[in-house]
Image (cartoon, coloured by chain):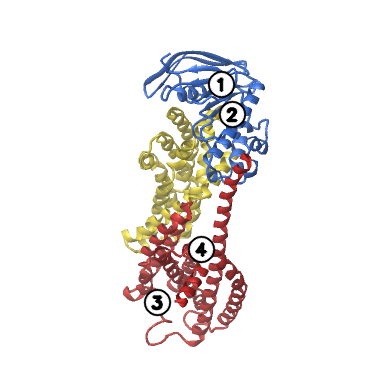
Chain colours: A blue, B yellow, C red
């Protein structure tokens, strides 16, 4: 499986943020998108997710598993927002996304254990702290299977221990043949990941 | 899809109390009518069906702007759009409309016979009005979905949605009211406008979600 | 000096929700029992009251209609006092009391409207007329619903308490309007006949069951109100405990 971008350009509000991007990410590889604020990291991720249309160029996913047609269907997108309802409990939120996006490898209880929130599945999402909310959002990636993970500042609000834990989860995803594209300021602790610098003078 | 329906119904019932506000608005609108036109029971019973319909129309428009806005604010909308390969987006929108209708409009329909008594309407007129509301109000919600989708990216789209939608809902109002009168006044037919009303609802059950889906896709940024 | 201290002590005691809970636990069974007893007696007396020579047996609707109407106004008055308690004395239970009373008041008002409507159909020939008494009670019903909607709309009880208290006090204007509407305007609804200057116009054979029923329903109101307050205190404790649980879940993982 390969995610390939050729001569990719993205714009926001009529302004061209980047153009002529070439990259290819294969199974088991991670691509770190770095760059200053406003360089178009989030825009690139949203283009890959199919939420925005690219200004130019080509984007395709080769050799995806048969269950997933097209790049959007094969991708998990973790944006700045957590996509959870504060009045519903953590378990209800995850249960909804699981039944909407399809049963994955892990059950809700297992996914919550992976982010160390096993005990508070019954609490309303709104009661949680910022970091806990982020971890519930990460658990959403586990309850349904998608080979491509698109992560926009995934560790925002996480403490050191949770960051380490999340790195472990990403490693597991890569080992099982997944692809990760992450926009980040901080190193995510993944060895041998490719880097794509946007908007840098270099 | 069942999960989406359940989630939206739960959200509507829990906290916020959006459903209660809709009914309250409906009650208040009907309660001010006699102040405006005077407490003449004959006059009230004659305009009762029309007033119930106008009140229900306004109360239905009230909560529509939150239909997609809430999902957009917390990022759920992105994921709903991304899942369109598994669940057709228009279908997702139709389910959301149905959930919204069940929580915030169905209570209005249930309350309408009671308000009919306040307006001194006859039993047949009350029954006909409740029935036409049951069949007609889904059309208002479905048309409203288009407006809500168009205005979703606006920070203060609330009033705008109502303004955009109101002209489009006028046919629903016309046939709803004429069917209600048809049930009581002799020369006027009941079945013909009632069937047209049902047809409008079915038509917008298809057109509304498709148009709203197109608007939502293009609104993503 | 010591008197003042003990007074403050008692004041704080009553304000303490835990103290209220144990007090309520002790009182509620007796209050509930008394309510059932008085209502049963009142019901029996009402059934045995003579039929009216004009109205027939429909006059007996009065025995429930009048208590419901009284209670709808009393409940709002209690809520207004509680609102003052929230705003002026900042009594921690005042807000609980107001919030718990609102749904009960709404139900009593609805029952007053419904029973009045059932009584009005044979008497006036219509379920509903738009005269001053009926409109003002209907407005009271709408205000109850508005207050309920406001308390439900805000998640944080501390924030909603003040807003609700202010709304309740503003709405209190309606209570004297309801009370005196039958005197101020010429309405279809009959004027007050029980509580009035120069003694009651009601025959004792009706007055006695009516008073017993009124006492019974007032007891019922206080029983329900106390239960609702207890539930509200428990609900707030559950919320607080859940927040603590959310915080402590993290400490567990770090250590």
Q: Along the horizontal axis of the image, is B78 left or right of A140?
A: left
Callouts 4 and 1 on one subunit: no
In the image, residue C76 sits, relative to residue B176, either above or below, namely below
Q: Eyeballing the image, is B116 above or below B90?
A: below
Single out the mark in the foreground, 1 or 3.
Answer: 1
What is the chain letter for disc 3?
C
Residue B1 visible in this rendered orientation of the protein: no
Identify the image quadrant of the N terminus of chain B: top right
Q: Earlier in the sequence, mark 4 or mark 3?
A: 4
Residue denoted by label 2:
B86
Circles 4 and 2: CB distance less than 8 Å?
no
Any mark on residue A71, and which?
1
Report the residue at 46% width, 52% height from top. C154
**Residue B165: % across, % down:** 39, 40
x and y percentages locating residue B8 in the rendered image:
54, 43
Point 43% across, 40% down: residue: B144
Q: Which residue is the site of mark 3?
A: C190
Q: Are marks 1 and 3 on the same chain?
A: no
Q: Mark 4 highlights which residue?
A: C100
SS of the residue at dot 1? helix
- Crowd around label 3: few <14 · some 14–19 · many ≥20 (10 Å): few
The mark lying in front, picked from 4 and 3, is 4
For the residues labelled 4 and 1, the Cα–Cα distance comes to 53 Å
How packed mark 1 is, by other alpha carbons closer than 10 Å (few <14, some 14-19, many 20 or more), is: many
């Amino acid at each position: 499986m390969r995610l390939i971008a050729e001569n990719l350009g993205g714009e926001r509000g009529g302004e061209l943020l980047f153009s002529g991007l070439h990259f290819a990410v294969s199974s088991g590889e991670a691509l770190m998108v770095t760059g200053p604020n406003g360089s178009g990291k989030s825009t690139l991720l949203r283009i890959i997710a199919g939420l925005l249309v690219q200004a130019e160029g080509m984007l395709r996913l080769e050799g995806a598993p048969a269950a997933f047609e097209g790049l959007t269907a094969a991708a998990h997108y973790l944006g700045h927002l957590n996509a959870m309802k504060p009045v519903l409990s953590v378990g209800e939120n995850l249960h909804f996304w699981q039944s909407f996006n399809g049963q994955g490898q892990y059950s809700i209880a297992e996914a919550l254990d992976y982010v160390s929130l096993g005990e508070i599945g019954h609490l309303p999402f709104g009661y949680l702290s910022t970091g806990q909310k982020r971890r519930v959002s990460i658990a959403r990636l586990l309850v349904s299977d998608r080979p491509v993970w698109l992560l926009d500042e995934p560790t925002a609000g996480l403490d050191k221990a949770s960051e380490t834990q999340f790195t472990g989860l990403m490693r597991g995803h890569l080992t099982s043949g997944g692809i990760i594209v992450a926009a980040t300021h901080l190193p995510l602790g993944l060895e041998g990941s490719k880097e794509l610098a946007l908007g840098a003078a270099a | 899809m069942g999960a989406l329906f359940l989630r939206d119904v739960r959200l509507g019932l829990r906290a916020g109390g959006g459903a209660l506000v809709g009914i309250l608005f409906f009650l208040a609108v009907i309660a001010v009518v006699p102040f405006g036109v005077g407490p003449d029971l004959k006059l009230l019973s004659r305009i009762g069906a029309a007033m119930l319909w106008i009140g229900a129309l306004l109360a239905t428009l009230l909560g529509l702007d939150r239909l997609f806005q809430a999902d957009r604010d917390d990022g759920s909308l992105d994921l709903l759009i991304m899942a369109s390969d598994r669940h057709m987006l228009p279908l997702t929108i139709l389910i959301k409309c149905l959930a919204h209708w069940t929580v915030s409009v169905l209570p209005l329909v249930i309350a309408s016979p009671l308000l009919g008594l306040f307006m001194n309407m006859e039993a047949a007129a009350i029954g006909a009005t409740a029935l036409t509301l049951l069949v007609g109000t889904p059309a208002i919600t479905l048309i409203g979905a288009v407006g809500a989708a168009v205005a979703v990216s606006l920070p203060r789209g609330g009033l705008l949605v109502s303004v955009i939608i109101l002209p489009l809902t006028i046919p629903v109002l016309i046939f709803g009211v004429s069917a209600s009168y048809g049930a009581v006044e002799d020369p006027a037919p009941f079945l013909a406008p009632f069937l047209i009303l049902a047809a409008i609802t079915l038509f917008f059950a298809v057109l509304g979600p498709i148009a709203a889906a197109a608007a939502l896709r293009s609104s993503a940024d | 000096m010591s008197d003042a201290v003990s007074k403050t002590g008692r004041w704080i005691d009553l304000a303490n929700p835990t103290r209220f809970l144990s007090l309520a636990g002790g009182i509620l069974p007796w209050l509930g029992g008394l309510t059932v007893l008085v209502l049963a007696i009142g019901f029996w007396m009402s059934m045995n009251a003579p039929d009216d020579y004009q109205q027939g047996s429909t006059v007996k609707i009065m025995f429930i209609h009048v208590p419901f109407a009284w209670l709808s106004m009393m409940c709002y008055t209690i809520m207004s006092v509680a609102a003052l308690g929230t705003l002026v004395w900042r009594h921690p239970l005042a807000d609980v009391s107001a919030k718990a009373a609102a749904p009960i008041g709404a139900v009593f008002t609805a029952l007053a409207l419904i029973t009045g409507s059932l009584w009005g159909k044979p008497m006036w020939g219509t379920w509903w007329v738009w005269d001053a008494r009926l409109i003002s009670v209907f407005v009271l019903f709408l205000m109850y619903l508005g207050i309920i909607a406001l308390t439900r709309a805000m998640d944080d009880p501390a924030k909603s308490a003040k807003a609700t208290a202010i709304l309740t006090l503003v709405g209190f204007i309606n209570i004297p309007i309801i009370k005196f509407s039958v005197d101020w305007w010429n309405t279809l609804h009959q004027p007050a006949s029980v509580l009035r200057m120069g003694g009651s116009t009601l025959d004792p054979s009706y007055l006695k069951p009516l008073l017993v029923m009124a006492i019974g329903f007032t007891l019922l109101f206080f029983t329900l109100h106390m239960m609702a307050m207890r539930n509200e205190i428990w609900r707030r404790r559950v919320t607080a405990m859940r927040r603590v649980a959310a915080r402590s879940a993290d400490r567990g993982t770090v250590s």
